[in-house]
Amino acid sequence: MHLLLRTLLLLLTSRRRPALDVWGRSSLPLRVLPTDIDIAMHVNNGMYFSLMDLGRFDLMVRSGVWSRMRRRGWSPVAAGETISFRKSLRLGQRYSIETRIIGLDDRAVYFEQRMVADGEIYARAFIATRLVSADGPVENEEILKEFGRPPADLVLPDWIHQWRLNNALPGRRRPAPHSWAA
């Protein structure tokens, strides 16, 4: 909710930025705002994922995929995320969110995103996303009709498969009882 106005503004302004291929890269220039930081005066660890949403929206809007998704009643949801931090982004600092799709499998579309300042990576995340409709998850064939076929050299890294397998929770139709037992 804290990024709602910023997201709406981005959805409007990204339409005026140069068009992109969905299989290409997006670079979204930003500045660290007071609402992005925590008591330590740097971007809060949880805020990185919220800000990275903006990078994915920018890529989707500029590639034209966003409007086609919305027409079909599809919404993007995060299914899994992992992030590594290297340096802190501080109040007022200029940076960019670099975004690209690194592949897809039968369960998700995978993004790599980087927070970059002064030519250096400050944080890097990998996000598994799903597209859902009122009827449930959207199948890959439908997604590829809207996105187009990925480049032949776009191959999902093997470690991503292992990450998803090792970190996935059961599907929502299967039980996932809580227990701390090891």
Image: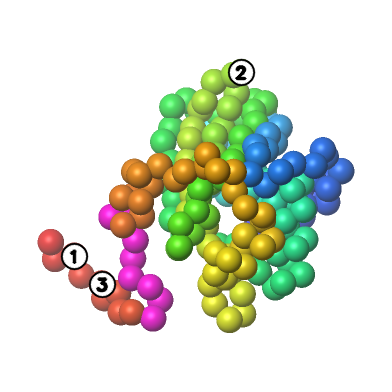
User: Mark 2 highlights which residue?
Assistant: 118
**Above/below status of 48 relative to 146:** above
User: Mark 1 highlights which residue?
Assistant: 180
How far apart are the two marked residues, 3 and 2, measured between alpha carbons?
44 Å
Q: Secondary structure at mark 2?
A: loop
Q: Secondary structure at mark 1?
A: loop
Identity of the residue drawn at 67% across and 54% down: 148
The amino acid on which the numbered mark 1 sits, given as a three-letter code, is: Trp
Residue 134, by quadrant, is: bottom right
Dot 2: within a 10 Å radius of its alpha carbon, few (fewer than 14), some, or many (20 or more) residues? few
Q: Is residue 77 magenta?
A: no
The amino acid on which the numbered mark 3 sits, given as a three-letter code, is: His
Dot 1: within a 10 Å radius of its alpha carbon, few (fewer than 14), some, or many (20 or more) residues? few
| Closer mark to the observer between disc 2 and disc 1 | 2
Can residue 126 be seen here? no
Towards the viewer: 153 or 61: 153
Of the two numbered discs 2 and 1 on the same chain, state the one appearing first in sequence.
2
| Percent of width and height locating residue 88 | 50, 28
Towards the viewer: 139 or 53: 139
Can residue 72 be seen here? yes
In this rendering, position of residue 138 left or right of residue 167: right
Dot 3: within a 10 Å radius of its alpha carbon, few (fewer than 14), some, or many (20 or more) residues? few
Q: Main secondary structure of the magenta part?
A: loop
How far apart are the two marked residues, 2 and 1, measured between alpha carbons?
43 Å
Q: Which residues are magenta?
A: 166-173
Residue 178's disc number: 3
Image color mode:
rainbow
- Can you name the residue that lies furthest to the top here? 118
Of the two numbered discs 3 and 2 on the same chain, state the one appearing first in sequence.
2
The amino acid on which the numbered mark 2 sits, given as a three-letter code, is: Asp
Asked if the residue at tag 1 contacts the one at tag 3, i.e. Cβ–Cβ closer than 8 Å, the answer is yes
Dividing the image into 4 quarters, which one contains the N terminus? bottom right
